[in-house]
Image (tube, grey):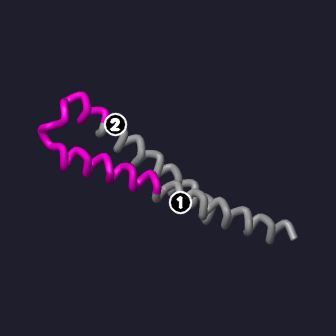
Amino acid sequence: MNKMADGVKDTVDNVRDGANEAGHRTEARAEQEKRNVAGDEMTAGDKAKSMVNQGKNEVQAGYDKTKRDVRDS
């Protein structure tokens, strides 16, 4: 019975982490696109903030993926 409960918990956790990963990857792409569209209209400070936000979201997405990979192995 515990094995089945663990399987269900892992599935729920994997779905949650997959959704979080997708959200973070979408936000990272949005930051990149924001810089592409705004181009030179963005100040250097705004570009730097956008790049930091993109990097943060990429790291968070990688973390969510790693949690799934570890759980699945």
Residue occupying the far left of the picture? 40
Q: Which residue is mark 1?
A: 19
At mark 1, the secondary structure is helix
Which residue corresponds to the image point at 65% horizontal and 59% vertical from the top-left? Answer: 13
Where does the C terminus fall, quadrant-wise?
bottom right
Percent x, y of residue 22: 46, 59
Which residue corresponds to the image point at 61% horizontal and 65% vertical from the top-left? Answer: 72
* In front of the other: 20 or 14: 20
Magenta part of the chain? 23-49
* In front of the other: 22 or 63: 22
Query: Is residue 10 visible in the rendered structure shown here?
Result: yes
Q: Amino acid at mark 2?
A: Val
Q: Quadrant of residue 6?
A: bottom right
Callout 2 crowding tier (Cα within 10 Å): few <14, some 14–19, many ≥20:
some
Residue occupying the far top of the picture? 45
Q: Is residue 58 magenta?
A: no
* In front of the other: 34 or 7: 34
Percent x, y of residue 10: 69, 63
Q: Quadrant of residue 52?
A: top left
Which residue corresponds to the image point at 40% horizontal and 54% vertical from the top-left? Answer: 25
Q: Quadrant of residue 70?
A: bottom right
Q: Which residue is mark 2?
A: 52
Left/right placement of residue 68 relative to residue 12 reads left
At mark 2, the secondary structure is helix
